[in-house]
Image (cartoon, grey):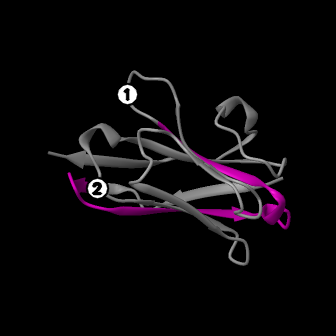
Amino acid sequence: QVQLVESGGGLVQAGGSLRLSCAASGRTFSSYAMGWFRQAPGKEREFVATITWSGGSIVYAASVKGRFTISRDNAKNTVYLQMNSLKPEDTAVYYCAGRSSGSGSSNHHDYPYWGQGTQVTVST
């Protein structure tokens, strides 16, 4: 079992940056693949990025590639999402998710463990 808690969201102007953190409890975190997803009002949950247990394989959604960076520190049981060059369309609640398979996935149905979410609002 893994429990996930996100932090780092907030209000930022377009072009700005934020770093989200997701702290995990549980001794098995280092074996879990992790993902970031987001959900804007009235829209379905959307894949953002995923990272394998070792960090050796990373996949981004096309909409964030080149602007966002996912990383993890297994010693700290934490996964990060560095978000640069933010746009108003990045406004959403951001969720981190974990799965016991070491390989990542862009499908939110593949993740049984979820955090509570953190709001990111990008103003014009």
Q: Disc 1 residue type?
A: Pro
Residue 29 location in percent, x, y? 78, 62
Q: Write the start and end of the magenta stretch as one range.
A: 12-38
Residue 19 is covered by the magenta coloring: yes
Q: Which residue is mark 1?
A: 41
Kindly give the residue lying farthest to the left in the view shown.
124
Residues at circles 2 and 1 in contact by the CB criterion of under 8 Å: no
Front of the two marks 2 and 1: 2
Q: Quadrant of the C terminus?
A: top left
Of pointers 2 and 1, the one earlier in the residue sequence: 1
- The image quadrant of residue 10 is bottom left
Helix, strand or loop for disc 2: loop
Q: Residue at x 42, y 45 (%)?
A: 64
Mark 2 and mark 1: Cα distance apart in space: 21 Å
Q: Is residue 67 left or right of residue 50?
A: left
Residue 55 location in percent, x, y? 70, 63
Helix, strand or loop for disc 1: loop
Q: Is residue 112 above or below residue 27?
A: above
Q: Is residue 50 above or below residue 30?
A: above
Kindly give the residue lying farthest to the bottom in the view shown.
75
Q: Is residue 71 above or below residue 101?
A: below
Residue 107 location in percent, x, y? 66, 32
Query: How many marks are shown on the rendered structure?
Result: 2
- Residue 116 visible in the snapshot: no
- Residue 34 visible in the snapshot: yes
Q: Disc 2 residue type?
A: Ser
Q: Which residue is mark 2?
A: 85
Q: Residue at x 65, y 33 (%)?
A: 108
